Amino acid sequence: MTNAGSYEDEVKPVRGDLFLDKLFGWLSLVLALVVLGTAIARLFKPDDLQWLESVRIVLIVLGIAGCWLATLSTVKAFRTVIALYFIRTVGAFAIYPWVGGPRYFGSEILFDLVVIGYALIRIKALKKAL
């Protein structure tokens, strides 16, 4: 008996770790696009700190690139994620005095550190799988 209209035979199972890489990567990427839109909107608001929004936009774009790379689930991609998020962390520390203090520290910098930690764990796991 066949399953009429069912795609069960065509669905390939996905390893859980690869699924989580794609889930977390795409979710973070979509959320980063929202933050990017907000930063672009603030760029056109007259303010004396226009350079700050420009720097934040560059940091957000680096984060979006890192999120996309995390969805690839390869050792090389995760090494690049670490480099990109290290640059983001240094940039976030550099603009820290102008962006709102601890609130910014808690959201941006801590997120970067979590992503770096996740990438290190995934590199270790992917090397064991090889």
Image: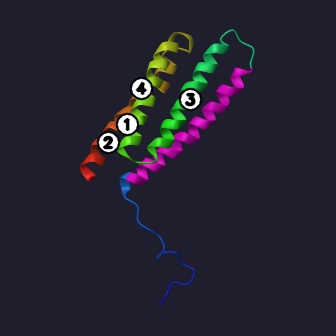
Disc nearer the start of the sequence (1/2): 1
Residue 124 appears at what percent x and percent y?
A: 27, 42
Q: Which residues are the magenta region? A: 18-44
- Is residue 109 at least partly visible in the picture? no
Give the class, few, some or many, for how many residues have Cα within 10 Å of label 1's Cα (few <14, many ≥20).
some
Disc nearer the start of the sequence (4/1): 1
Question: Among all residues in the image, which is located at the extreme front?
Answer: 76
> What residue would you read off at disc 4?
86
Q: Which mark is residue 60?
A: 3
Residue 31 appears at what percent x and percent y?
A: 57, 38
Q: Amino acid at mark 4?
A: Phe
Disc nearer the start of the sequence (3/2): 3
Q: Which mark is residue 123?
A: 2
Q: Amino acid at mark 1?
A: Arg
Please say if 60 is above or below 128: above
Q: Are marks 1 and 3 in contact (CB under 8 Å)?
A: no
